[in-house]
Image (tube, rainbow, N blue to C red):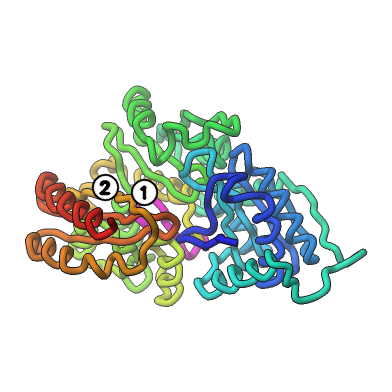
């Protein structure tokens, strides 16, 4: 049993690394650790989704849990329903990965992602189950859990977005293009925005089980950039496969990333007295320009480790209401327990509509992005001591840049990859320092 939780659940090649046998055992362990009550399961549009959902549901039911299969639902939709009903939830999705991959994300009752301690308990229970150490009798007869289907439950999430998020404000007159990555928000995003008065053009919204994230969505925004310019739209929104993140495109086709989106929303909330403690929460990957922009607007920045669950933990710890990641995960804690791409898109459109300013103007006011180079370096295997051995190289790079830039090395939580990030006044300087660090990583991992 080699399953390990990464920064966003379990992920791997469907039916090879992430098998139905493994999903079944994870279902059993999840029922034992998180509770045998009612469980919700949603999926994105991958072909392997129903296979893994059925296996996970079987594992949960075999331990006495009652399972409701929600069908295709965005990750934040499952989190919302989990919170509303105070039940546990699971999402079958590999987010922005290609369709051949899949994953399982678990929510504790209330729509909360799991802590490291709970994940470690699940991993230990999986080992026991995989070696036949059940540790007790399994339910029989009427005590066996049920599995039912409720594909209409997503309408509750849709109604929440349409009727409660903007407090009766409208989006009339705005022209927007949405790219739903042939994923879980296909149909839903355009419907929600259109219901609030926006004029919506949708692209990449026809999933066939294999085209999710295929040269589209938040990781491939080129089609959206072209479509926004061609349509003369005010802006565009690009979602990932499970719609828990979003990036934007302004009217000129310029990409607006998560840092800029968070900055725009933070300034707007701060000016309206709705940014609790005048603080926004981001990860250490946020651009140095974001930190400088927030300081210019009198907003405090709290930084966390990479991963939206760490952002959520800090939001709750400090009583803050807004945070997220450069990748486009944005959490409005007063309305959601996880990143929500559609909800974030609604707020961004609302700010454009209320202020009568273009997205480009809002982004420029929020921050000036420093050139940033990010290179993923694949290593032979995951090595917990590798970053420690690289500390002299990092120190040398930081000395080169001084206070004009920033260096960050971090190991991937799911694969043998070291991410090298460098920010500097110019792209050429950032790339030169990054390439020096890449060479050091490769040498140290040989």
Location of residue 140 (image quadrant): bottom right
Q: Earlier in the sequence, mark 2 or mark 1?
A: 1
Using the image, tell me which numbered label, if any, was put on residue 301: none
Residue 362: which disc? 2
Spot the residue most to the right.
141
Residue nearest the observer in this picture, 100 or 299: 100
- Residue located 42% across and 32% down the image: 215
| Foreground pick, 399 / 442 | 442
Classify residue 107 as left or right of residue 445.
Answer: right
Magenta residue check for 283: no
Give percent across and percent down for residue 234.
Answer: 34, 34
| Residue at image coords 57%, 35% | 187
* Secondary structure character of the magenta stretch overall: loop
Question: Does the rendering let one see residue 87?
Answer: no
Report whether residue 100 is seen: yes
x then y, percent, for residue 419: 30, 55
Which residue lies under the disc numbered 1? 351
Viewport quadrant of the C terminus: bottom left
Whether tag 2 and tag 1 are in contact, CB under 8 A, the answer is yes
Asked whether residue 330 is drawn in magenta, I would say yes
SS assignment at label 1: helix
Stretch in magenta = 324-337
Q: Is residue 429 above or below residue 190?
A: below
The residue at the point 52 percent across, 31 percent down is 211
The crowd level at tag 1 (other Cα within 10 Å; few <14, some 14-19, many 20+) is many
Q: Regarding mark 2 in the picture, which secondary structure is present there? A: helix
Q: Position of residue 205 (x, y in %)?
A: 53, 31
Taking 1 as reference, is 377 left or right? left
């Amino acid at each position: 049993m080699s399953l390990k939780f990464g920064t966003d659940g379990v992920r791997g090649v469907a039916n090879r690394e992430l098998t139905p046998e493994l999903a079944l055992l994870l279902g059993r362990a999840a029922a034992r650790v998180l509770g045998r009550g009612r469980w919700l399961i949603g999926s994105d549009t991958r072909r392997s989704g129903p296979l893994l959902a059925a296996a996970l549901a079987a594992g949960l039911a075999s331990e006495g849990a009652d399972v409701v299969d929600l069908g295709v639902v965005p990750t934040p939709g499952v989190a919302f329903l989990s919170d509303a009903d105070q039940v546990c939830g699971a999402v079958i999705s590999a987010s922005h990965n290609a369709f051949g991959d899949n994953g399982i994300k678990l929510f504790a009752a209330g729509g909360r992602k799991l802590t490291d301690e709970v994940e470690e308990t699940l991993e230990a229970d999986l080992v026991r189950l995989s070696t036949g150490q059940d540790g007790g009798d399994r339910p029989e007869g009427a005590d066996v859990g049920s599995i039912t289907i409720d594909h209409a439950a997503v309408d509750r999430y849709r109604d929440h977005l349409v009727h409660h998020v903007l407090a009766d404000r409208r989006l009339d007159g705005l022209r927007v293009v949405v790219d739903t990555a042939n994923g879980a928000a296909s149909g839903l995003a355009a419907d929600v925005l259109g219901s609030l008065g926006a004029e919506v053009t949708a692209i990449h919204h026809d999933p066939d089980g294999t085209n999710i994230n295929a040269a589209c969505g938040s990781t491939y925004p080129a089609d959206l950039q072209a479509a926004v310019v061609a349509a003369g739209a005010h802006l565009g929104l690009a979602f990932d496969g499970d719609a828990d993140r979003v990036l934007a495109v302004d009217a000129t086709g310029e990409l607006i990333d998560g840092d800029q989106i968070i900055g725009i929303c933070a300034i707007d909330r701060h000016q309206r007295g709705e940014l609790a403690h005048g603080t926004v929460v981001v990860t250490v990957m946020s651009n140095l320009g974001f930190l400088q922009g927030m300081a210019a607007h009198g907003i405090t920045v709290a930084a966390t480790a990479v991963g939206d669950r760490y952002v959520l933990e800090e939001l709750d710890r400090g009583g803050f209401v807004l945070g997220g990641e450069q990748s486009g995960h944005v959490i409005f804690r007063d309305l959601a327990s996880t990143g929500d791409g559609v909800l974030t898109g609604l707020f961004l459109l609302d700010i454009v509509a209320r202020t009568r300013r273009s997205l480009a103007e809002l982004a420029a006011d929020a921050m000036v992005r420093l050139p940033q180079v990010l290179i993923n370096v694949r290593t032979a295997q995951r090595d917990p001591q590798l970053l420690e051995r690289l500390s002299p190289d990092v120190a040398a790079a930081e000395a080169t840049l001084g206070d004009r830039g920033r260096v960050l090395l971090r190991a991937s939580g799911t694969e043998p990859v070291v991410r090298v990030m460098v920010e500097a006044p110019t792209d050429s300087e950032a790339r030169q320092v990054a390439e020096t660090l890449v060479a050091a990583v490769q040498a140290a991992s040989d």
